[in-house]
Image (tube, rainbow, N blue to C red):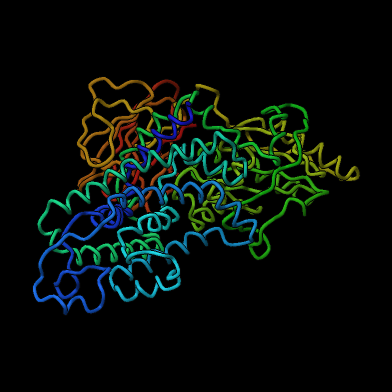
């Protein structure tokens, strides 16, 4: 029951989110307006309609209005088709395509083609008749587009891409791993029904509007053409990924609600569904996080779903099976993650020291932000950190999921037989990890001549010794200490009279997105950070400057240019609580604060 409730609520939230905007015109016109009881005229203005014979237009001298037979079930059929195909594609589409050795996006492209054909048919009736000829053997009284709602819904469901919140993520993970049980089906169906409710409301609103507004009642032909144009526009937009551009341009006003729904232990336990566990990774929990001795937790899961590789010969992928006989260290990281930035020097040093002695370090770049999916950004980040070992772009978190990972950074140490022998989540534990690397190298080749251990300082902060990482986007803002509501879109903020420790507050006019904050106008905007740490960094992007004033009198101006990356805003800060006053110029995007 918990899964059904979570699925319904998650679907309802998604159904009113910005990500459903691209399909709304099609739902409104084809699911709603076309089911209205309105007078129907042919292209010459005479009564007839779609099902009239070619001579009907000339057989009537006057356009006497009449109401043609329509299906009042059409809105329900369109939404039912959408729910059906979305459920099936999400749950088993990936598995079926993999079994048939077909590209994963073939269903989506076929559905877009179907939308284009239906759209042309709505605009050009003769083309519609051509489409119907292969089905001429099916008995029917008349051709009636109003009864074709289920097929339209099927095509829409195959291209429908709702926002990937935690509920949908759990469904996708279960479907991609093939671990589809009763719980997964219940969650998927309830989620789809939840999404369908707002869409059905919109379709019925379209029908009601078409029946009540005179302009709609006399333009049935125009409605069909508009519906056809909307379908074609949706298909073309999807082909060029334009809906994603629209979604990025609009604030996700439902992100906070989605987080409240799933950010609790009960919801997390319910959403697990066992979907993260499969035959490849079922034994990983036999290893203890940060153990000081080697353990054994099954054969290493495969590296899968990688969008691109670099630092390999011809940028080709790596199969772990080809590395049997050698030791492998899998390092999950993200280039703007401060925890990863403190950890990466250890991985780089191990690669440089032991890379020619049988150790293979593989960096799995699993993005936390959308901008971290860009290959050029990742390559630039890897170059900045001196990473020369192979890097895989795990943009869909497929390998991350296959390793049941939940942390940046995370290390998985694999022996020469392909067995995972050590897991370490988060920062620290470097000395033990290196000790076990050396043990496994000797196990793989007893004659190996190992050099001395690496000498990289462990700068992992003590637990509680610094302010925790602070995000400025509305989807997961933490440590906000202002008195004004922190909400997506434009707002004017004032600093509180008394700001809590380890918090931030805004001043001036800001525009808040799900992942970053930026000044709303041409004038700079300000924020105040109360923190305790010896080092503060900000993830910034865009073009402009950031002026930072520390309470000890230190001031610096930071030039920001280009894609998001981490900038040092305060260094060698003394003990205790401190305050940073920061002025952000127009054109700069502020993503987060990290502390060391």
Q: Is residue 303 above or below residue 218?
A: above
Which residue is located at x 33 percent, y 62 percent? 231
Using residue 127 as the reference point, say whether residue 586 is left or right of it. Answer: left
In which image quadrant can residue 426 be found? top right
Badge count: 0
Q: Nearer the viewer, residue 108 or 151?
A: 151
Of residues 498 and 482, the one nearer the viewer is: 482
Horizontal side, residue 210 vs residue 241: left or right = left
Percent coordinates x, y for residue 437 in the rendering: 76, 38
Q: Position of residue 254 (x, y in %)?
A: 33, 38
Q: Closest to the observer: 109 or 377?
A: 109
Nearest the eye: 467 or 52: 52
**Residue 571 appears anywhere in the view:** no
From the viewer's perspective, tell me whether residue 120 is left or right of residue 306: left
Q: Is residue 363 above or below residue 137?
A: above
The answer to whether residue 411 of the structure is visible from this angle is yes
Residue drawn 10% across and 67% down?
A: 64
The x, y position of residue 361, in whole percent, is 69, 47
Q: Which picture quadrant has residue 274?
A: top right
- Residue 511's x, y, as percent? 26, 43
Left or right, residue 48 beside residue 149: left
């Amino acid at each position: 029951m918990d899964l059904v409730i979570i699925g319904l609520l998650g679907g309802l939230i998604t159904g009113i989110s910005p990500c459903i905007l691209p399909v709304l015109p099609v739902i409104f016109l084809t699911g709603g307006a076309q089911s209205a009881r309105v007078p129907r005229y042919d292209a010459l203005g005479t009564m007839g309609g779609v099902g009239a014979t070619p001579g009907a237009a000339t057989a009537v001298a006057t356009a006497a209005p009449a109401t043609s037979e329509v299906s009042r079930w059409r809105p329900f059929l369109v939404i039912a088709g959408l729910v059906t195909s979305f459920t099936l594609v999400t749950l088993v589409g990936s598995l079926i395509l993999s079994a048939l050795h077909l590209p994963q996006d073939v269903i989506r492209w076929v559905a877009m083609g179907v939308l284009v054909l239906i759209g042309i048919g709505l605009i050009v009736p003769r083309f519609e008749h051509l489409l119907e000829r292969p089905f001429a053997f099916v008995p029917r009284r008349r051709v009636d587009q109003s009864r074709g709602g289920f097929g339209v819904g099927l095509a829409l469901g195959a291209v429908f891409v709702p926002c990937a919140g935690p509920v949908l993520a759990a469904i996708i993970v279960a479907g991609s791993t093939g671990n589809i049980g009763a719980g997964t089906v219940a969650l998927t169906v309830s989620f789809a029904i939840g999404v369908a409710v707002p869409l059905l409301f919109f379709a019925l609103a379209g029908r009601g509007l078409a029946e009540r507004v005179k302009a709609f009642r006399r333009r049935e032909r125009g409605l069909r053409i508009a519906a056809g144009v909307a379908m074609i526009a949706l298909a073309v937009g999807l082909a060029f990924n334009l809906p994603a551009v629209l979604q990025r341009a609009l604030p996700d006003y439902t992100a906070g609600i989605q987080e409240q729904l799933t950010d609790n232990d009960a919801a997390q336990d319910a959403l697990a569904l066992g979907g993260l566990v499969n035959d490849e990774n079922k034994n990983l929990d036999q290893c203890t996080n940060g153990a000081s001795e080697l353990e054994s937790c099954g054969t290493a899961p495969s590296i899968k779903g990688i969008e691109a590789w670099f630092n390999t010969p011809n940028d080709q992928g790596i199969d772990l099976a080809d590395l049997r006989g050698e030791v492998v260290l899998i390092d999950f990281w993200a280039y703007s993650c401060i925890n990863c930035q403190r950890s990466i020097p250890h991985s780089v040093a191990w690669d440089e020291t032991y890379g020619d002695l049988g150790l293979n370090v593989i960096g799995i770049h699993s993005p936390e932000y959308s901008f971290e999916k860009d290959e050029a950004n990742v390559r630039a980040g890897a170059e900045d950190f001196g990473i020369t070992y192979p890097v895989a772009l795990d943009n869909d978190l497929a390998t991350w999921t296959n390793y049941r990972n939940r942390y940046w950074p995370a290390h998985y140490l694999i022996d020469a037989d392909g067995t995972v022998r050590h897991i370490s989540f988060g920062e620290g534990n470097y000395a033990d990890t290196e000790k076990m690397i050396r043990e496994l190298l000797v196990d793989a080749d007893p004659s190996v001549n190992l050099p001395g251990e690496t000498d990289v300082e462990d700068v992992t902060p003590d637990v509680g010794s610094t302010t925790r990482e602070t995000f400025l986007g509305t989807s997961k803002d933490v440590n906000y200490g202002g008195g004004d509501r922190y909400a997506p879109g434009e707002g004017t903020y004032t600093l509180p009279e008394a700001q809590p420790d380890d918090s931030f507050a805004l001043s001036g006019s800001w525009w808040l997105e799900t992942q970053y904050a930026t000044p709303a106008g041409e004038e700079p905007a300000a924020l105040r950070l109360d923190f305790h740490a010896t080092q503060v960094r900000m993830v910034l992007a865009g073009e402009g400057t950031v002026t930072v004033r520390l309470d000890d009198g230190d001031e610096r101006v930071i030039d920001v240019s280009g894609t998001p990356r981490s900038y040092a805003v305060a260094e060698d800060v003394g003990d205790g609580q401190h305050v940073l006053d920061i002025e952000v110029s127009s054109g700069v995007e502020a993503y987060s604060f990290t502390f060391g």
